[in-house]
Image (tube, grey):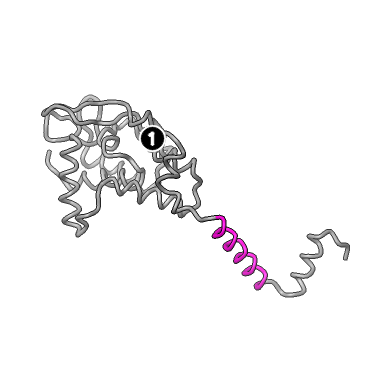
Amino acid sequence: MGCRPEWFRPFIALCAFAALRLGEAVGIQLDDVDFLRRTLNIQRQVQRSLPGTVAISPPKYGSERTVFIPAGLTQILASHVQDIGVHGAKNWLFVGPVNGLPPAQNTVGGWWRKAAKAAGLPDVKLHDLRHFYASGLIAAGSDVVTVQRALGHAKATTTLDTYSHLWPTAEGRTRAAAEDLLDEALRIPAGSLRTDAVQSAGIPL
């Protein structure tokens, strides 16, 4: 099987919206996806091996994990299973050009470079999709441990070393909190604001 857009799009979606590493994404089997609970179990990765073969091993740094996936990604994967199907006795979601096995990393890398070039994004690497996902979690207010677990980092320090610049600083949080207070105060009539302040202080009216 060559680079078929109808299945490569779901592969890219796994990398962008579940933060899978390349080897983890090509190693997904049907039983790894819980369509009802919208979870994805990362249990293996496909590594480089001799021509005509692939090597299956546990995820990098022992990063077996469960990823909570959005409904849209669940639908993409369900459509992929229905329209394209799964492959082999192990029900691989993606298959490469040799022996019905998952595609090797260098094969997928070549397909990605072609797709990125066709999209006018030749400098974007497949691994950048993990950074895209992480930055989205952080922008939505996720804490360090949540992002660490989603990405499969062995240590929270790895997550901080990579993404600390994306989390708001204490100064930024202080300004944001003060801004919220100011906005709330300006929406409340002066009399009500005085009453609320007095009651908060425990002063009898």
Quarter of the picture holding the C terminus: bottom right
Query: Residue drawn 21% across and 45% down?
Result: 8
What's under tag 1, amino acid-wise? Answer: Asp
Q: Residue furthest bottom?
A: 190
Relative to 62, residue 135 above or below: below
- Identified at 30% across, 39% down, the residue is 21
Which portion, as a residue range, is magenta?
170-187
Q: 28 or 107, which lies in front? A: 107
Horizontal placement of 57 versus 34: left or right?
A: left
Give the side of residue 5 with respect to residue 14, left or right: left
Who's the residue at 12% across and 38% down the image?
1
Residue 130, x across and y down, in percent: 34, 46
The residue at the point 35 percent across, 35 percent down is 33
The residue pinned by badge 1 equals: 34
71 versus 41 height, above or below = below
Q: Quadrant of residue 74?
A: top left
Q: Is residue 180 left or right of residue 91?
A: right
Does 121 sit above or below residue 28? below
State whether the magenta stretch is mostly helix, strand or loop. Answer: helix
Question: Quadrant location of residue 78?
Answer: top left
Front-lying residue, 16 or 32: 16
Q: Horizontal and vertical percent for residue 83?
A: 22, 42
SS state under label 1: strand
Q: Position of residue 110 (x, y in %)?
A: 15, 44
Residue 122 position (above or below residue 93): below
Q: Position of residue 125 (x, y in %)?
A: 25, 49
